[in-house]
Image (cartoon, rainbow, N blue to C red):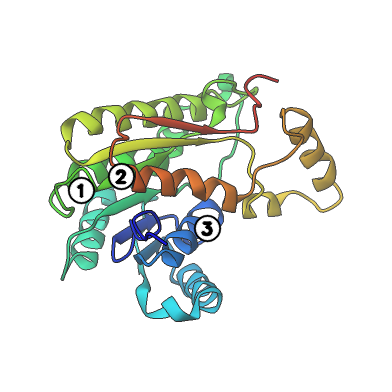
């Protein structure tokens, strides 16, 4: 059997910011299974240690191909130097082929009438300033080739926001704009965005167990597939954007048809 399809990511060096849980973790597991050399990043060493243990247990034959680096993006004043230190460390021997950005801190929804400038700015520290500053630095640490890529993450709340989600929707729309701008600025390196709908990740752990079934049921009812997404399913979109060297400035929506329901 020809190996031209399943060997595209073999030996590729991939950095995943937010790779210790949810979608980012499954992207790491997915590309690791395809022979990539993976670095996952998180703000806390404890989360890195746990994620690395799980990845190595899942794919013991690839255990030597995965490592982790701490990078805190929560303080906007230190975001750029922290990212630069991360990139320097990860590329000390080889440049990167791909970067995936799924990082995001907890979302605390507030009515738009109650928003203050400080609150608005804080909500964008990771989700907006992070990918924008990363894009400004990445060119010096990646292979300058159409086979290289950066993939950002937005969400369906941009197109169909709920009450109180105005700030999140604004930053998400900004992320998609950043990706299109970077696709022009960094060419031939490709830059794309994945927009997930409702995905059952660890973020649902904050919902009380007695309420979780009804919350998941509401999400299923709002889809055309009568389902809630899984991080494993979402990883397919990120891997596609890494593998397809003709995709740039693109937006991949994975939402079970919820925007049509």
Badge 3 or badge 1: first in the primary sequence: 3
Binning the other alpha carbons within 10 Å of mark 3 as few (below 14), some (14 to 19) or many (20 upward) gives: many
x%, y% of residue 260?
Answer: 65, 19
The image quarter containing residue 84 is bottom left
Q: Judge whether 221 appears above or below 83 on screen.
A: above
Image: 239 above or below 87: above
Mark 1 neighbour class, 10 Å CA radius: few under 14, some 14 to 19, many 20 or more: many
Q: Secondary structure at mark 3?
A: helix
Distance of mark 3 from mark 1, alpha carbons?
A: 23 Å
Q: Are marks 2 and 1 in contact (CB under 8 Å)?
A: yes
Give the quadrant of the N terminus.
bottom left
Q: Nearer the viewer, mark 3 or mark 1?
A: 3
Residue closer to the observer: 152 or 50: 152
Pointer 3 with pointer 1, Cβ within 8 A: no
Q: Residue at x 38, y 59 (%)?
A: 2
From where the camera sits, is residue 130 visible? no
Q: Which mark is residue 138?
A: 1
The answer to whether 74 is drawn above or below residue 119 in the figure is below
The residue tagged 2 is 150
Find residue 258 and report its horizontal and vertical position in percent.
Answer: 66, 26
| Residue occupying image coordinates x 20% and y 48% | 138
Task: Report crowding for label 2: few under 14, some 14 to 19, many 20 or more residues within 10 A (C-alpha).
Answer: many
Q: Name the residue: 38% across, 32% down.
A: 175
> Horizontal and vertical percent for residue 241?
38, 42
């Amino acid at each position: 059997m020809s190996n031209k399809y399943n060997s595209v990511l073999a030996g590729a060096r991939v950095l995943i910011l937010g790779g210790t849980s949810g979608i980012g973790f499954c992207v790491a597991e997915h590309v690791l299974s395809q022979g990539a050399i993976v670095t996952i990043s998180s703000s806390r060493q404890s989360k890195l240690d746990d994620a690395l243990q799980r990845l190595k247990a899942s794919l013991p034959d690839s255990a030597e191909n995965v490592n982790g680096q701490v990078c805190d993006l929560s303080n906007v004043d230190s975001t750029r130097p922290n990212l630069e230190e991360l990139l320097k460390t990860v590329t000390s021997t080889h440049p990167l082929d791909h970067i995936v950005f799924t990082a995001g801190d907890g979302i605390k929804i507030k009515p738009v009438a109650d928003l203050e400038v400080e609150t608005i700015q804080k909500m964008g520290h990771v989700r907006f300033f992070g990918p924008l500053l990363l894009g400004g630095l990445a060119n010096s640490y990646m292979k300058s080739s159409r086979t290289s890529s950066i993939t950002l993450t937005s969400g369906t709340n941009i197109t169909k926001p709920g009450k109180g989600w105005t700030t999140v929707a604004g930053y998400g729309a900004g992320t998609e704009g950043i990706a299109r701008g970077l696709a022009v600025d960094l060419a031939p390196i490709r830059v794309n965005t994945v927009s997930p709908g409702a995905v059952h990740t660890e973020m649902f752990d904050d919902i009380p167990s007695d309420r979780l079934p009804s919350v998941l049921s509401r999400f299923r009812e709002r889809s055309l597939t009568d389902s809630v997404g899984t991080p494993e399913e979402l990883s397919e979109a990120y891997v596609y954007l890494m593998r397809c060297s003709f995709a740039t400035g693109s937006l991949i929506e994975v939402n079970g048809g919820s925007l049509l329901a």
